[in-house]
Image (spheres, helix red, strand yellow):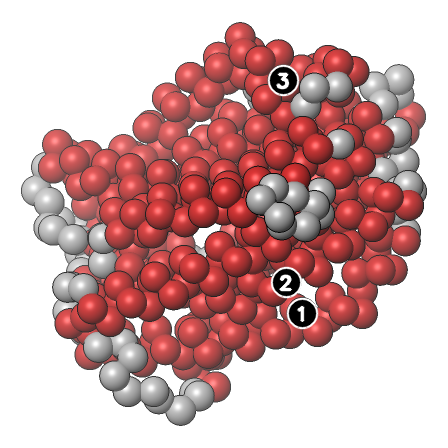
Amino acid sequence: MNITHNRSQKLRQLFVILFPILITQLGLYAMNFFDIMMSGKYSTDDVAGVSIGSSIWVPVYTGLSGILLAITPIVSQLIGARNKKSVPFSILQGVYLAAAMALLVMLIGSFVLNPILQGMSLTANVHRVAHDYLVALSIGMVPLFIYNVLRSFIDSLGQTRVSMIITLLALPINVALNYLLIYGKFGFPELGGVGSGYATAITYWIITIIAVVVIIKIHPFSDYQIFKTFYKVSFKEWASLLKIGVPIGFSIFFETSIFAAVTLFMSEYDTITIASHQIAMNFASFLYMMPLSISMALTIVVGFEAGAKRLQDAREYSVIGIIMAVSMSLLCALAIFFFREPVASLYTEDEKVMQLTAQFLIYALFFQLSDAIAAPIQGVLRGYKDVHITFLMSLVSYWVIGLPTGYLLATFTDMGAFGFWIGLITGLAMGAIGLSGRLLYIQWIKYPKKYAVK
């Protein structure tokens, strides 16, 4: 990370940090994309089962891994304040916390998974695929959570290219394992959609091992000697991490779990509707990687500037990031509109699923603008460590406004499944408005009173 003196330098530094984050996010997303796409080529039941399993897993994972995102603003501010000695202790405590969280999720999941699936109107085969997919995926849960901590450390130093390289190395391995285990090639068992769960779990182990080696062996990470001293578990440090991380995690959970809740409601529809909805949602999530990546980059640069009390620089970064996200969202909306049918054909060869997916993708157009405003603002606020109010905003906008609106439209109008998508769009819009107000308060009322502005 370098100190910048004008907007041109800021734009250059933000892009240098952002581009590898985007490639990394797309790579991680691609694992889920190939799970669903390759399962869809196997059978409609398998893509439905993997989609249901994914819709249960994603909000749990993103919510809990969101807690671990506390590492990024903590380390960024420590580095901005030139307090490097405290970094190894914080990172190692984050690793301990990550492992504990993963084990707890696995324990709880062993009790609640079957009841959740039994509460859905699924065919026996779709139920089986969803259950076995999640069981297979759990094998990689501990390394995945640990990797999130290590990646946050790597990214907080501004070395986002390293995370990108790790992901790009792992992606072809994941695709190859999918090919072997889904279709039973070269003597491997033919597991269908369940095989994608095992393939992804193995890949999680690989990227975690690579990250550990990089941090131990390669400059500048090796300078911090993260694993030189294995400190005792510090529940006080865990509390500090959780104080920042829990609101972040809940904010992400409220946003992602509403999509899972909609999928649960969708289980009342037929398999074609379930598959079409999930495919469209999967592609919308793919496009979300751009504003999400900008959000993560803004957390790093704003945290760095806020830690050094350069608040004018932090404000300038936020403006650049939001403008960039909105501009990209308009391009993504055009891409959805003109290429929705070819996109649908990537996931399935079933003509009915393809046609219905193209209709759902029209609604995904309206996700783009709200996401382009809300996501980067969340990243800026995390850079300031302002996380408590935003998670309440997420709860209200998504669960008090968005989901009830969608349920009412789907149940009491002739919109059917499309009503849920309108509810999601409403919730995202309300979230964007609330976050915009919070950012204005933080930047122009709260912090100018606390620090001198350059």
* Labelled pair 2, 1 in contact (Cβ < 8 Å): yes
The mark lying in front, picked from 1 and 3, is 3
Q: Earlier in the sequence, mark 1 or mark 3?
A: 1
Residue 417 percent coordinates (x, y)? 81, 26
Report the Cα–Cα distance between label 2 and label 1. Answer: 7 Å
Q: Nearer the viewer, residue 333 or 107?
A: 107
Residue 293 in the image: x percent, y percent?
Answer: 39, 41
Q: Which residue is mark 2?
A: 138
The amino acid type found where label 2 is placed reads Ser
Residue 361, quarter of picture: top right
Percent x, y of residue 262? 76, 39
Which residue is denoted by mark 3 in the rendering? 345
Crowd rating for badge 3 (residues with CA inside 10 Å; few <14, some 14–19, many 20+): some
Looking at the image, the residue that sits furthest to the left is 5
Residue at the extreme top of the image, as rendered = 338
Image check: 217 left or right of 117? left
Q: Which residue position holds label 1?
A: 106
Furthest residue in direction front, as rendered: 187
